[in-house]
Amino acid sequence: MLAKIISAANIGLDANLVTCEIDISSQGLPSFTIVGLGDRAVEESKERVRAAFRNSGAEFPLHRITVNLAPADMPKEGPAYDLPIALGLLLASGQVISNPEKLDLENTLIAGELSLDGSLRKINGVLPLAILAKTRGIKRMIVPKDNGVEAAIIEGLEVLAPESLQQLVRILLGQESLEFVERPVINLEDGLSYEYDFSQIKGQESAKRALEISAAGGHNILLKGPPGAGKTMLARSFPSILPPLTFEEAIEVTKIYSIAGLLDSNNSLVTTRPFRSPHHSASYVGLLGGGNNIRPGEISLAHRGVLFLDEVAEFPRQSLESLRQPLEDRRITISRASGSISLPAQFVLFAARNPCPCGFLGDKKRNCACMPGQIAKYKRRISGPFLDRIDIYLEVPPVEVEKLSADLEVESSAEIRKKVTAARKIQLDRFKGPPAGRAGKILTNSEMGNKDIKEHCTLTQEGLDLLKMAVSSLNLSARGYHRVLKLSRTIADLATSENIQAEHIAEALQYRAREES
């Protein structure tokens, strides 16, 4: 007898439908075979299903069993096929009968891992499966209890989340009532609670202004200063001035965290912009993503948020150079012999570095202990092409004692965020049209291409004259020229100016990295 169950496979951040075909034949010796290009975890599913049947009170068929995961040329990985295989065996052996009036299994996507005692364990990547089900017109899903709320985020999808195989059988036999998971109440304002606030930072007005511009336009920033100047504190406070995630952005981020297995069962949706701070000893794969079973790296986990590289000069040269392409394309493509996968990497790069190995070069109170050769070698750790992708390069001096002890009124993160959100609103209105000739929708000025710059970066004559002078005197590259224009556009948006003035160009030019830096 043959049974068919709908399941799905995650490939990158997207999911594809998989049909689990289970055939039980009385001809031949008893065996259990799974075909369809499954990995080791899929192959081991046979033993989990056998034990789950025995410990759930079900009768495992002692016949020739063949399970085909179609399409056969698409790789399948992970334990998510345990539940569809087990349910298919129950249907094919006649222990459970499908009742379309009660629960139509032919229009249900099923995924879940089985424990040996028959209980259902949480799996990764359920949200992409739920999105696939919705787009393909599948009305419901059956997933483990710990994945129920995650799947129920998608509106219009009925989600059944049993605790065990035994409970699912009771529901199908009508011995237990059918109860779907309620869709969670989504409040994106919940993500606006922060440990660090700009009101806690005394002094550093120039740095705060630079961070405000960076947040408003999504521009990359690098701070250089001695130890104790406040670089890390500024970085930790930076997310508090970013606008809240939109629902579409929250779904994008949650998909990544779901695939990576970092989604908390109690938090079905990521509502806070990610802040990732990898150590400089992080591996190349850990930073960019990859592995045998490709998983998102730090740059994808920072999608729609912030990637903070503290002591950026201590990172391996290969790792920094490998960031150049994702910083331009805002995606990372990982190629393997079996194919390539593209993952989103739309983040603000926030880097911090010391001026020299000891950290005190140029400090008025402490002497630098480094030799000239050591300083030159330290500066060469960050290449010119990498610096060319930094929009804002700022030196952060130590805060004077008088400012630290003074009881001055300091602008809070909420006040700065209000200005940043207003500037972002201007940009959303600017780019709300169809993305003609673009790879995707633009949300911030930093994402503009050359055509967008030409259309939206209108300069006054004084601003144009100043920019021409700067191009020749500062030896700006074509990339540097366009980054100055995009940064100037953001500064003008913060000032609610329709055209880019000379003062906006002048401020943007102050943030360009100099060769001697």
Image: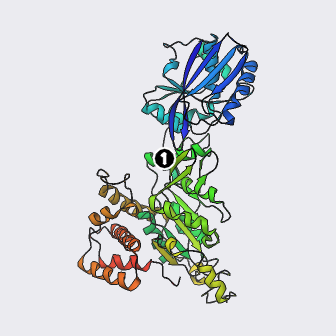
| Residue 455, quarter of the rendered image | bottom left
Q: Position of residue 234 (x, y in %)?
A: 55, 69
Vertical side of 342 occupied by 93: above or below? above
Instruction: Tell me the SS state at disc 1.
Output: helix
Q: Residue at x 63, y 81 (%)?
A: 377
63 horizontally vs 471: left or right: right
Q: Residue at x 37, y 52 (%)?
A: 441
- Residue assigned mark 1: 252
| Residue 469, quarter of the rendered image | bottom left
Name the quadrant of the N terminus. Answer: top right
Q: Position of residue 319 (x, y in %)?
A: 60, 64
Q: Position of residue 79 (x, y in %)?
A: 65, 33
| Residue 72, quarter of the rendered image | top right
502 horizontally vs 61: left or right: left
Answer whether residue 236 is visible to the viewer in this image: no
Front residue (pair 291, 307): 291
**Amino acid on which disc 1 is placed:** Glu
Vertical side of 439 occupied by 402: above or below? below
Vertical side of 279 occupied by 96: above or below? above
